Amino acid sequence: MQKVTGAGKFVFPGFQSMKRPMSENALNGALRRLGHSGDEMTSHSFRARASTLLNEWVNGIRTLLNAD
């Protein structure tokens, strides 16, 4: 992750301080500008969906690597 974050602690740092994460409202605003309504996508649902997809992908890679 260091290639993405550099010396920072967060993948999505706050706008005013690199020491704090981006706020939930900033993420929700970005999703609204991308055309997602509040009923279909929030920052929490985006995080949960990304977590699920990434875990499935990693498990798929492990399965392929361990296949006989």
Image (cartoon, rainbow, N blue to C red):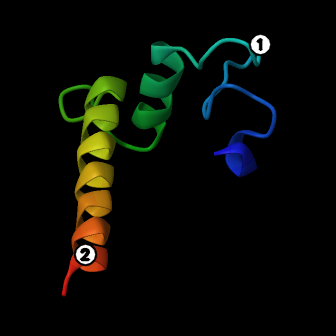
Instruction: Determine whether 65 is above or below 15 in the image.
Output: below
Where, by quadrant of the figure, is residue 49 drawn?
top left
**N-term-proximal mark, 2 vs 1:** 1
Instruction: Determine whether 24 is above or below 29 in the image.
Output: above
Residue visible at 53% across and 14% down in the picture: 23
Instruction: Determine whether 18 is above or below 51 in the image.
Output: above
Residue visible at 18% across and 87% down in the picture: 68
Q: Position of residue 63 (x, y in %)?
A: 21, 71
Where, by quadrant of the figure, is residue 20 drawn?
top right
Viewer-nearest residue: 64 or 9? 64
Residue 44 shown left or right of residue 29 in the figure: left
Within-10-Å neighbours for mark 2: few <14, some 14–19, many 20+: few
**Element on which disc 1 rests:** loop
Viewer-nearest residue: 20 or 38? 20
Q: Position of residue 62 (x, y in %)?
A: 29, 67
Residue 7 shown left or right of residue 35 in the figure: right
Residue visible at 59% across and 20% down in the picture: 22
Q: Position of residue 33 (x, y in %)?
A: 47, 37
Disc 2 versus disc 1: nearer the observer = 2
The quadrant of the picture occupied by the N terminus is top right
Instruction: Determine whether 10 is above or below 1 in the image.
Output: above
Residue 17 shown left or right of residue 55 in the figure: right
Number of callouts: 2
**Element on which disc 2 rests:** helix
Residue annotated with mark 1: 17
Residue extending furthest toward the bottom: 68
What type is the residue that disc 1 sits on?
Ser
